Amino acid sequence: DGGITQSPKYLFRKEGQNVTLSCEQNLNHDAMYWYRQDPGQGLRLIYYSQIVNDFQKGDIAEGYSVSREKKESFPLTVTSAQKNPTAFYLCASRHWTAINYGYTFGSGTRLTVV
Amino acid sequence: QQQVKQSPQSLIVQKGGISIINCAYENTAFDYFPWYQQFPGKGPALLIAIRPDVSEKKEGRFTISFNKSAKQFSLHIMDSQPGDSATYFCAAGHSGGKLIFGQGTELSVKP
């Protein structure tokens, strides 16, 4: 089955700790995205990557970092500089054909600060 | 220019009724307008999408209406069911670019 796998489903972070969220896709999509979702605030773009070894900041990149060493993988690190990291994190990849395009989302990782 | 404004923020509809969610955009370069459905604890999933060369697209009980001159589009859910209770996101984008999402509408369909 083709899709996007996010892991872990739940993650707990202690104050001052860096944590990494995994996102893997086997859809052969070039572009990948990370979003943060808070209640009532929709989807806010953290980082995105259109090709391997290249990525751009989104609207709320401060306190986060990413890498794109392989087409299939786009991990997100939540650093200690992110003061309010508790949220639901969504990874997506973009498909595009001559007919339409859109995003395929993973099932998300819920991060909680303890 | 890049914003997509979605309303209402929340919506309660009786079973069998019509649910209507509206979105407005600013960037006339946008040429793709999808709607996503998200259940609690899950990622959004593509529900239906439209391009600006048509004014309406229907898939089952779900219909997108598109008004290019007003830069508005809407989702209609006919014969709404409790299983339709979810958060709905509109989005807009142009080929090769990233999607811009609305703020989301939390729909609750009462039995």
Image (tube, rainbow, N blue to C red):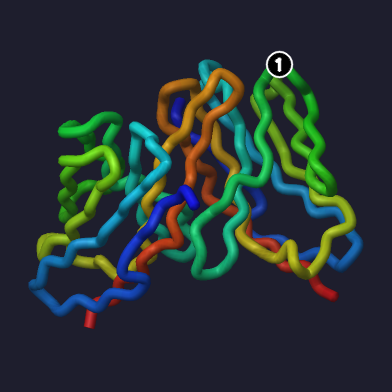
Q: Nearer the viewer, residue A104 or A85?
A: A104
User: What residue do we see at 89% from left, 57% from top?
Assistant: B79
User: What residue do we see at 16% from left, 55% from top?
Assistant: A63
> Which class describes the residues within 10 Å of circle 1: few (<14), some (14-19), or many (20+)?
few
Q: Is residue B7 above or below residue A85?
A: above
**What's under tag 1, amino acid-wise?**
Asp
Q: Quadrant of residue A52?
A: top left
Numbered disc 1: secondary structure? loop
User: What residue do we see at 51% from left, 22% from top?
Assistant: B27
Q: Nearer the viewer, residue B76 or A105?
A: A105
Q: Which residue is mark 1?
A: B53
User: What residue do we see at 18% from left, 50% from top?
Assistant: A62
Is B102 situated left or right of A71 in this image?
Answer: right
Q: Quadrant of residue B5?
A: top right
Q: Is residue A12 above or below residue B95?
A: below
Q: Position of residue A88 (x, y in %)?
A: 38, 65
Q: Position of residue A90 (x, y in %)?
A: 39, 56
Q: Is residue A11 above or below residue B12?
A: below
Q: Nearer the viewer, residue A17 or A5?
A: A5
Is B75 situated left or right of A28 in this image?
Answer: right
| Image mark count | 1
Instruction: Name the quadrant of the C terminus of chain A.
Output: bottom left
Q: Position of residue B73 (x, y in %)?
A: 69, 33
User: Looking at the image, which residue sits at the far front?
Assistant: A1
Q: Is residue A101 above or below residue B7?
A: above
Is B3 situated left or right of A71 in this image?
Answer: right
The chain to which mark 1 is attached is B
User: Looking at the image, which residue sits at the far bottom?
Assistant: A114
Q: Quadrant of residue B69?
A: top right
